[in-house]
Image (cartoon, rainbow, N blue to C red):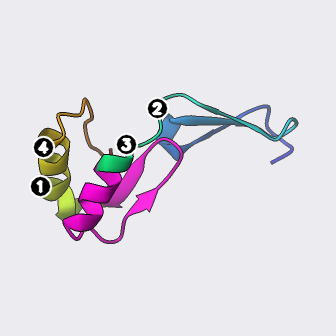
């Protein structure tokens, strides 16, 4: 990654400076309660990053239910069949 000044990661939610090896989150980390709830609801696969939670599009309704149930100000974005909150 030495060719770049900054790397945009996690669908734009994280900046990485390769020269300094520093990360700068551009949003809050995922709510532990939200992640726990998705696991309880059986969402799999479930990938938890520093700023986003990812799974596949078939879990859209379950993820939205979890967002509403916990009254979170989140939305889902899609990219090639994957959903991110």
Other residues around mark 4 within 10 Å, as few (<14) / some (14–19) / many (≥20):
few
Give the extent of the magenta segment: 34-55
- Real-space Cα distance between discs 2 and 1? 23 Å
Numbered circles on residues, count? 4
Which one is nearer the viewer's eye here, 72 or 33?
33
Seen at 37% across and 42% down, the residue is 31
- Real-space Cα distance between discs 3 and 1? 18 Å
Secondary element at image label 1? helix
Q: Which mark is residue 69?
A: 4
Q: Position of residue 41 (x, y in %)?
A: 19, 65
Q: Position of residue 33 (x, y in %)?
A: 31, 48
In the visual, does 63 lie left or right of 53? Answer: left
Magenta stretch encompasses residue 37: yes
Q: Which mark is residue 61?
A: 1
83 lies above or below 10 = below
Seen at 86% across and 35% down, the residue is 20
39 lies above or below 32 = below
| Residue on which disc 2 sits | 28
| Residue on which disc 3 sits | 31
In the visual, does 37 lie left or right of 3? Answer: left
Q: Position of residue 7 (x, y in %)?
A: 68, 39
Q: Which of the marked residues, 3 or 4, is nearer the chain's N terminus?
A: 3
Seen at 39% across and 51% down, the residue is 53
Q: Which of the marked residues, 2 or 1, is nearer the chain's N terminus?
A: 2
- Real-space Cα distance between discs 3 and 4? 13 Å
Secondary element at image label 3? loop
Look at the numbered discs 1 and 4 and tell me whether their residues touch, using CB distance below 8 Å. Answer: no
Q: Which of the marked residues, 4 or 2, is nearer the chain's N terminus?
A: 2
């Amino acid at each position: 990654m030495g060719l770049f000044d900054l790397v945009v990661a996690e669908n734009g939610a994280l900046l990485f400076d390769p020269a300094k090896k520093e990360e700068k989150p551009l949003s809050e980390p995922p709510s532990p309660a939200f992640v726990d709830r998705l696991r309880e609801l059986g969402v799999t696969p479930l990938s938890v990053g520093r700023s986003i939670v990812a799974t596949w599009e078939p879990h859209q309704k379950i993820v939205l239910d979890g967002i509403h149930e916990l009254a979170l100000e989140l939305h889902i974005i899609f990219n090639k069949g994957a959903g991110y909150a």
